[in-house]
Amino acid sequence: MKRSIKQLLLGMALLSIILTLASSLYAGYRADRQTLKDITLETNSAYAQKLAKITEGYLLRTERTLAYSASSLSKAVSFENTEYLNREAERLVVQSESLSSVVITDGRGIIRGTSKGVEGLVGEPMQGTDTVKSLHTGLPEISEPFTSKTGRLIVFISTPILNADGEIAGMVGGSIYLSEENVLYNLLGQHFYEDGSYVYVVDSRGMLMYHVDPSRVGEYVDNNKVIEELKRGNEGSMQLVNSRDQKMLAGYAVIPLTGWGIVSQRPAEKALAPANRMLLEMIVKTIPLLILSALLILYMASRIARPLERLAGYAADHKNGTGPQTVDSGAWYREAIELDRALNDSFMNYREQMDHFILESSTDPLTGLFNRRALTEQTCTLTEQKTGFSLIILDIDRFKRINDTYGHSAGDEVLKFLARKMTEHTGTAGTCYRYGGEEFVIVLPGRTSREAARFADRLRIDISAENSPVGEPITFSAGTAQLPEHAIHFLRLIEIADECLYYAKENGRNRVVDAEEFQPTV
């Protein structure tokens, strides 16, 4: 069947619009998925590194606690005084908050004192090379996980007791019960989220030491690329299929003190879900525009075809010898201009919607501040323009207590209160971002880190002097750093500022630490 020119024009125009819209939607969808993937991998990697540092800090503090006890025992006690040794062992369990049980042995490895719960071991010899290693090396030791005499899967942390002559007289050691609530659960258990993100810890052999599913503790994980990288001592991020055949976006880091690995991961499906929702929203909002365009094209096709129909009629009349001397086919060029203008208007509306979606994807919906994606884009622009800037990263002190005491809704109001204060103080001098959770970032172009620190301190004093939405003042800790003085890459700059922030946290909170006064780890 022969098609009319009106049908051909309508079909070609509709096909062109559909293909253009489809390719634009697909390109935007792919770009958004890649951005979400990159951000998730980067976040998980930074998070795993942060947790590795915190966990190593806990272990080092535990070693120092045991070392102090060993020093006291070497001067003040006989190994025959079981009652005193038992009290000292129980004190270590209560005060360290990280040890499940403590034993004190003499130089032969015979247990002379214990904390509560393992009193039956008094008089028994320590078993296993890992438990008596300190007696041979004379150094603090942290064992790999093993099954103890009580049948528990444990990690044993020990330090020698030296006599006045510097000889090994005994040992004080503490156990972390991996299959029961312990320091890893207290430290990492709070990092499990409803979006499917979770953290797990493996030893240098690939055995699970901590997992959100306690039944998996003690399990050896095979055919996992992340764990193979951790065994080699590497850290970073990657997409992988885990042992349960689930696609994950994982960041991983090694604890240098022990060789253990920490993995922070999130299911790829949940991490990329926002891209699917955005695509669906764009399609739904584009359909009415497509329908309107189709009606307009049908109208314009009729107008385009009408002069040709008249020309055909004139040709037939001339064939019959009855045609006029002059041919008037209508206002052809005006019709073509109207069609072009209508199509341009349609695509302009589409581009405006795309710009709107991009703006929404760069803004934090709770506080109205720019989000991490926008932060990355601005800092890239400043770096390309070789414009120096300082960065402030701040974190609300004890924000978890606010959520636990007043509820998450009140916590959200506190976040919005802080965002408003940041915006008021910053004005046009810089830009404020919500970096994630209770962490915020302020970028100040052309400012030194010392100026940024003074700026942050003024903001800190102002906020701490005013009651927040929960009826009490809040405080924050902050770290500042400057590019290019302290780093030539943005990611390294954020790490330096973050180290300053955590130094402020570790040293009393409610303070600002500048990279100029605190030399971070290189």
Image (cartoon, grey):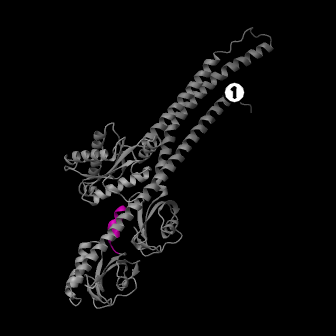
- Establish if 133 lies above or below 341: below
Magenta stretch, residue numbers: 180-191
Residue drawn 72% across the image and 17% down it: 311
Where is residue 432 shown, x and y percent of the image? 35, 43
Report if residue 309 is visible in the image: yes
Q: Is residue 403 left or right of residue 3?
A: left
Work out whether residue 468 or residue 305 is closer to the camera in this orientation and state it.
468
The 10 Å Cα crowd at callout 1, few under 14, some 14 to 19, many 20 or more, is some
Q: Position of residue 359 (x, y in %)?
A: 43, 40
Residue sticking out furthest to the front: 165
Give 383 or 516, whichever is nearer the viewer.
516
Does residue 429 appear left or right of residue 488 in this picture?
left
Tell me which residue sits at (24%, 45%) in the image. 458
Residue at figure coordinates x 34%, y 69% from the top left: 185
Residue 272 visible: no
Quadrant where the C terminus sits is: bottom left
Query: Does the stretch in magenta take in 255?
Result: no
Check disc 1 and report its element: helix, strand or loop: helix
The amino acid marked with disc number 1 is Ile
Q: Residue at x 73, y 17 (%)?
A: 313
Which residue in the protein does label 1 denote? 5
Please state the horizontal and vertical placement of residue 133, each as a whole percent of the image.
Answer: 38, 83
Q: Is residue 186 magenta?
A: yes
Please tell me whether residue 273 is drawn above or below residue 170 in the rendered image.
Answer: above
Left or right: 22 in relation to 92 = right
SS assignment for the magenta stretch, majority: helix
